[in-house]
Image (cartoon, coloured by chain):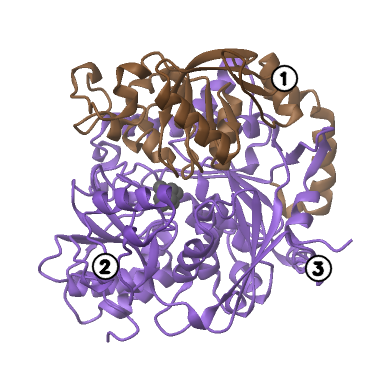
Chain colours: A brown, B purple
């Protein structure tokens, strides 16, 4: 997993609540057996005027100019600003893969779908929860200031305007923070406790043998 | 300390705890399907790791398998990328092993959340995970069951554990008797309508009360299944006689002396009488009417005798805009009576409502009637090969066929439309599935979620009707 320490980037505003993972990456693109290549089909149904299919040349497809990510001001954006319950619905990890592949490193929203939030952490995409009010203000800022950027500092758990004029704090589990800051392989970490897992398992096997075999 | 059912299940699986409360949780059952597993097996291989405990794995291909043309074998999967996923799962299970594998075309193949319980592979007290959000279904058996992403699938394959933080406890208490024509699906939709699609975020839900106790296991599975649509990752029901009778004699359920021991232990899987819940939601079963969704989120739902809501009456600006956008996508005018909504297609299936009881309920409505001329396609997709054969033994396939329904092979089918079964842009569907998101059943398709009875009656009339009055 790629480390996340400090990130400064352009903010793209997606002003809709309850954006589900079907919208983030539609099901026809889940047929891939790889983790990469989903970026061109991020928000496919909103981004293009036609219906996308895997294997098509996305560069040749008609774009929907009204969709925010197609607008010139969002070119190169790496922080997505979203509304409540972002990433609800299906557990598809293709959603954070698509966001990362597109170039996003962080999503800021008042709340997230839990599985999506989990999946994001595992891939080095930082889901940041800010209060509804703060998110509202950020939507205003993005609209008011072309090229609006934010600086995210994971260690300090802060999101700041680049002039340093406003600093917002966010919460994150210490363990998750530690893994992200160091780009740790969670499986490797867990396997350090293989002995404990084996002991737990042996006890369970003795007590409830029907769960095994 | 008085514990909730969730507290007991959680505590019983903690291998170790980090300082911040993150727990390493032991996983008993790992359900695997073709869409969310290939990258996990690939990851294992790249890291040179093996599978920790293969006998925890039960696998099947369901998400993008076709529901017709099975006589053509694997070649019947016209889509090359879908076929690759199905054969990749075959390869992965063959090289790593599993307790059970029901591959495409197998007599016991089916939707992963249908085959687990029906084979007795889902047992009370287990932790059950799967790379699919509707894993919450298995909570009906007093399991701690939740959906995970592909990285976590890999984590479970490699370590038999997951890193997780404990949720808060929510009790959903449903008392009273459900009226005629009102089913578990309506309870689930009514709850989501009440608390919203984020209402359960951060909680584990326990369903209790006389209405839940009165439900069959199928009905409890329907409610637990929809828990994720209420924002909670897991929902559960305590063990009672219904649970135990359902499991008796299932292929993977314990037998003989072990059965007796297991039952004694399972009987303890209920919340203590004075256990504390962080939030309690009460529903009166007698007040629940048949529900139909009108929008693009499961919380956009009303009772059949109501009208499509008017965004003008919504005070909150963000909600108003969301409603207006949903109505535009759905091609609906505000204040339209739900009964007047005409449909093009009907889908009876999905892990929410494709079990034998669902098919019986729908068949009872359809029997001796004909699908309306205006309905282009009405299809029944049984949840598994076993459900299909049981239905055929009971003659339900004939009832559906005689009425003009198509009787298909099992799988997820038009619940998410990864295979050839889908809505065309603008088509409107009465569906027994669980998600009415934009494009869920096909790009531009319009989904109305309803119970099997309501979807069946809509097929006959060509528009929604109130099954309570309609006979
Ligand atoms: S039936 Fe639908 S919701 Fe259920 S597992 Fe299949 S795709 Fe997911």
Label 3, residues with CA under 10 Å away: few <14, some 14-19, many ≥20: some
Do tags 1 and 2 sit on the same chain?
no
Q: Are marks 2 and 3 on the same chain?
A: yes
Give the vertical position of B209 relative to B171 (above or below).
Answer: below
User: Is ligand 1 closer than 8 angstroms to the Cβ of mark 2?
Assistant: no
Q: Is residue A111 visible?
A: no
In which chain is the residue bearing label 3?
B
Characterize the local packing of mark 2: few (<14), some (14-19) or many (20 or more) Cα atoms within 10 angstroms. Answer: few
- Under tag 2, what secondary structure? loop
Residue of label 1 = A156
- Residue indicated by mark 2: B335
- Residue B280 visible: yes
Q: Nearer the viewer, residue B427 or B261?
A: B427
The numbered dot on residue B329 is: none
Residue extending furthest toward the right: B1
For the N terminus of chain B, the quadrant is bottom right
Q: What residue is rendered at 63% in x and 13% in y?
A: A6
Do the numbered discs 3 and 1 sit on residues whose CB atoms are within 8 Å? no
Q: CA distance from mark 3 to mark 1?
A: 42 Å
Label 1 marks a residue whose chain is: A
- Camera-near label (3 vs 1) is 1
Dot 3 corresponds to which residue?
B272
Q: Earlier in the sequence, mark 2 or mark 3?
A: 3
- Image vertical order of residue B168 relative to residue B83, above or below: below
Q: Position of residue A12 (x, y in %)?
A: 42, 24
């Amino acid at each position: 997993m790629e480390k996340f320490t400090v990130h400064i980037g352009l903010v793209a505003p997606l002003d809709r609540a309850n954006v589900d993972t079907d919208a983030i990456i539609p099901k026809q693109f889940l047929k891939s057996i790889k983790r990469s290549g989903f970026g061109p089909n991020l928000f496919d149904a909103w981004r293009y005027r036609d219906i996308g299919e895997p294997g098509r040349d996305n560069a040749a497809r008609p774009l929907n100019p009204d969709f925010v990510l197609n607008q010139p001001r969002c070119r190169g954006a790496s922080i997505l600003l979203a509304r409540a319950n972002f990433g609800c619905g299906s557990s598809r990890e293709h959603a954070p893969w698509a966001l990362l592949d597109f170039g996003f490193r962080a999503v800021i929203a008042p709340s997230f779908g839990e599985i999506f939030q989990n999946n994001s952490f595992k891939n080095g995409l930082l889901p940041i929860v800010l209060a509804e009010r703060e998110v509202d203000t950020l939507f205003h800022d993005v609209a008011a200031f072309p090229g609006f950027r934010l600086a995210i500092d994971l260690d300090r758990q802060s999101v700041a305007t680049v002039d340093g004029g406003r600093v917002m704090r966010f919460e994150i589990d210490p363990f998750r923070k530690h893994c992200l800051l160091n780009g740790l392989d969670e499986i490797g970490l867990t396997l350090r406790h293989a002995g404990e897992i084996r002991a737990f398992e042996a006890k369970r096997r003795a007590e409830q043998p029907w769960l095994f075999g | 300390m008085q514990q909730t059912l969730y507290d007991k299940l959680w505590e019983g699986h903690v291998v170790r705890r980090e300082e911040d409360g993150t727990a390493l949780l032991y996983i008993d059952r790992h359900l695997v399907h073709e869409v969310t597993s290939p990258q996990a097996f690939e990851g294992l291989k790249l890291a040179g790791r093996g599978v920790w405990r293969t006998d925890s794995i039960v696998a099947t291909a369901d998400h993008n398998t076709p529901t017709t043309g099975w006589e053509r074998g694997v070649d019947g999967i016209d889509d090359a990328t879908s076929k690759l996923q199905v054969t990749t799962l075959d390869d992965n299970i063959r090289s790593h092993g599993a307790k059970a594998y029901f591959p495409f075309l197998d007599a016991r193949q089916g939707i992963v959340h249908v085959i687990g319980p029906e084979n007795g592979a889902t047992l009370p007290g287990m932790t059950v995970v799967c790379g699919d959000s509707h894993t919450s279904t298995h909570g009906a058996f007093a399991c701690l069951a939740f959906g995970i992403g592909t990285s976590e699938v890999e984590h479970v394959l490699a370590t038999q554990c997951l890193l997780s933080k404990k949720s808060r406890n929510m009790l959903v208490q449903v008392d009273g008797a459900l009226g005629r024509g009102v089913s578990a699906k309506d309870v689930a939709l009514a709850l989501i309508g009440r608390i919203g699609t984020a209402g359960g975020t951060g909680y584990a839900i326990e369903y209790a009360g006389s209405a839940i106790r009165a439900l069959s296991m199928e009905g409890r599975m329907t409610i637990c299944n929809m828990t994720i649509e209420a924002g909670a990752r897991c929902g559960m029901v305590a063990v009672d006689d219904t649970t135990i009778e359902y499991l008796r004699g299932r292929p993977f359920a314990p037998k003989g002396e072990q059965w007796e021991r297991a039952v004694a232990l399972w009987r303890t899987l209920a919340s203590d009488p004075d256990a504390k819940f962080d939030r309690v939601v009460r529903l009166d079963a007698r007040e629940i009417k048949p529900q139909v969704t009108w929008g693009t989120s499961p919380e956009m739902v009303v009772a059949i005798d109501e009208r499509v809501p008017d965004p003008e009456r919504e005070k909150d600006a963000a909600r108003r805009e969301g409603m207006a956008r949903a109505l535009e996508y759905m091609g609906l005018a505000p204040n339209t009576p739900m009964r007047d909504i005409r449909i093009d297609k009907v889908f009876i299936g999905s892990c929410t409502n494709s079990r034998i009881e669902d098919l019986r309920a729908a068949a009872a409505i359809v029997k001796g009637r004909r699908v309306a001329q205006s309905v282009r396609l009405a299809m029944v997709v049984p949840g598994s090969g076993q459900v299909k054969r049981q239905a055929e033994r009971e003659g339900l396939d004939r009832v559906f066929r005689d009425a003009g329904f198509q009787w298909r092979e099992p799988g997820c089918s038009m619940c998410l439309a990864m295979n050839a079964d889908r809505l065309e842009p603008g088509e409107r569907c009465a569906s027994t599935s669980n998600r009415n998101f934009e494009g869920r059943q096909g790009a531009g398709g319009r989904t109305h979620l309803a119970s099997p009875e309501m979807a069946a009656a809509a097929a006959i009339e060509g528009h929604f009707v109130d099954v309570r009055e309609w006979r």
